[in-house]
Amino acid sequence: MSLLPFEHPFLSGLFGDSEIIELFSARSDIDAMLRFEVALAEAEAEAGLIPADAAASIVTGLSAFSADMTALRDGVAKDGVVLPELVRQLRSAVGGPAAERVHYGATSQDVIDTSLMLRLKAASEIIVSRLGRLADGLDALSSRDGKERLMGYTRMQAAIPITVADRVRSWAEPLERHLFRLENYAQNGFAVQFGGAAGTLEKLGDKAETVRAILATRLGLTDKPQWHSQRDGIAEFGNLLALTTGSLGKIGQDIALLAELGGEIRLSGGGSSSAMPHKQNPVSAETLVTLARYNAVQLSALHQSLVHEQERSGAGWMLEWLVLPQMVTATGNALLVAERLVAQIDKLGSTES
């Protein structure tokens, strides 16, 4: 059993997203860390900082690496981060003179943060794709039912008639803006982290910027100076997630209210009741509201993690680990639920004048 509903044996039926969750698995994290260490060795060899044969030995030695997870867990308990034990295992796997060149000039946070960027970039691509599909679904709904009538409500009171197209537009336009924001963020938001012990890359001398640029290119990330204690980019991405789920929550809330009134929407695939078999509960709509509120709360914690003291932090950094993966998963799940919900709308609006 998991403490998190996203991976719970049965609650994951409501909140799970296997595609996103896999990106935050230990296996994916270690794979991304290995990508960093291999790319770092190659970049340093290209810049003339380490021998080419040492880089080749590192690439070969790590190609079939399998981590001792028990030792990693014990190492984290002692060191607070996985890298000291992981680097020990990596150097053992490489062996020979090249072993000491593994992780040369880097610090634990470089590897962990770059691993995060690699996986957030992959998650963002999934989220953008799903936003696109949802936009297509809303467009199809508007094309089918857009001329039908709905009662417009202001402050929870019946106001004047509107069309389905009017209501769907209020759902779709924020999502289009979020899609634009995410695509814009992807242009330079997923940056390599490489600063060494205190952000100065002191071991690399005048080759530091060259190595960082090569490293970023090899990993498909943006080249930026170290951002160990500058976490505004992380908070900005979290805000995009919360904005997305908030707008999906608005869709869910509207559909739940339409289902409550009953006359202007026909849904298929609603949830059943153990006590009242005649009911079809708007489970998907309610889930969207829940996830919107969940991410709104988590965003405040992510903003707390902006407080990174001096050159590098432990406390603020660990808080990100407890919050950000869940926000990404909640967003991915919400998009899947929203896409399914829109497809379940058999009829929206009324032809009555």
Image (cartoon, rainbow, N blue to C red):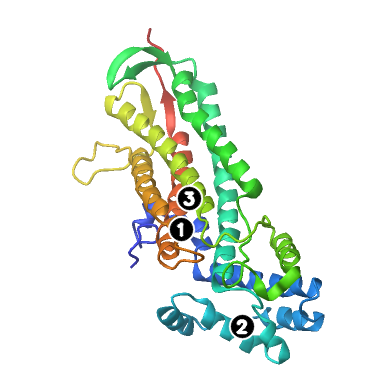
Residue 275: x percent and y percent? Answer: 18, 44
Residue tagged by mark 2?
Answer: 90
Q: Which class describes the residues within 10 Å of circle 1: few (<14), some (14-19), or many (20+)?
A: many
Residue 198 location, quadrant: bottom right
Residue 97 location, quadrant: bottom right
Q: Earlier in the sequence, mark 1 or mark 3?
A: 3
Specify the amino acid type for callout 2: Leu
Where is the N terminus found, in terms of image quarters? bottom left
Residue tagged by mark 3?
Answer: 235
Where is the C terminus found, in terms of image quarters? top left
Specify the amino acid type for callout 1: Pro
Specify the amino acid type for callout 3: Ala
Which of 101 and 115 lies nearest the eye of the viewer? Answer: 101
Query: Quick check: 261 left or right of 70?
Result: left
Q: Earlier in the sequence, mark 2 or mark 1?
A: 2
SS state under label 2? helix
Q: Which class describes the residues within 10 Å of circle 3: few (<14), some (14-19), or many (20+)?
A: many
Q: Quote the CA–CA distance across marks 1 and 3.
A: 13 Å
Q: Is residue 239 above or below residue 211?
A: above
- Dot in front, 3 or 2: 3
Q: Is residue 257 above or below residue 129?
A: above
SS state under label 3? helix
SS state under label 1? helix
Numbered mark located on residue 325 in the image: 1
Q: Is residue 250 above or below residue 353?
A: below
Q: Is residue 237 above or below residue 175?
A: below
Q: Quote the CA–CA distance across marks 3 and 2.
A: 32 Å
Which residue is located at x 44 percent, y 22 percent? 167
Q: Earlier in the sequence, mark 3 or mark 2?
A: 2
Query: Quick check: 200 left or right of 76?
Result: right
